Image (spheres, rainbow, N blue to C red):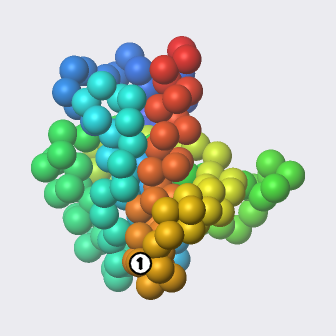
Amino acid sequence: MSDLKSNIVEIENLKALHRPGLRLFGLDLGTKTIGLALSDGMLSVASPYHTIRRTKFTRDASELAALSAKEGVFALVIGMPLNMDGSEGPRAQATRAFVRNLADKLDLPVTFWDERLSTVAAERAMIEADLSRAKRAEKIDAAAAAFILQGALDRLARL
């Protein structure tokens, strides 16, 4: 799918693309890492899954493609880093560029999900779980991705 418009779908249209047993990946795109979360096949629960250490885009995209195939992923939910007033800044533009480039490497539909405060919420949950700073630093990206994905799954459940 090299046409950007063809791989971006609204959350409302994602449910129609689901087949039993297939799952969603949630992504929290950072400059150094990509946090991944995985849904169950019923699209009800998101779990932290993995963190990709970013190197070159081609390698990152290959790892994402391999993991997507391994886990039976049918679409990606990518956190959109909006400003607190809802506007898009440089990080949102970088996210759109990532998706544009990814369309040539990975033939999966993508939906964007507002990620405002997802890292804050994930951090709070880990503090409440009494995780050490080192453990939190190691797991924060995947936990933030799970928070993003769970929000999208909750929305899908209400549709």
For the question of whether residue 2 can be seen, the reply is: no
Report the side of 44 relative to 122 (left or right): left
Residue 31 lies, with reference to residue 2, above or below; the image says: below
Closer to us: 75 or 39: 39
Q: Quadrant of residue 75?
A: top left
Residue 134 horizontal/vertical position (percent): 44, 84
Residue 35 lies, with reference to residue 54, above or below; the image says: above
Residue 151 horizontal/vertical position (percent): 55, 38
Residue 130 horizontal/vertical position (percent): 50, 69
Residue sitting at 28 percent across and 51 percent down? 106
Closer to us: 117 or 134: 134
Give the residue type at disc 1: Lys
Residue sitting at 18 percent across and 39 percent down? 72
Residue sitting at 28 percent across and 35 percent down? 40
Residue 99 horizontal/vertical position (percent): 46, 54
Report the side of 22 relative to 32 (left or right): left
Residue extending farthest right = 85
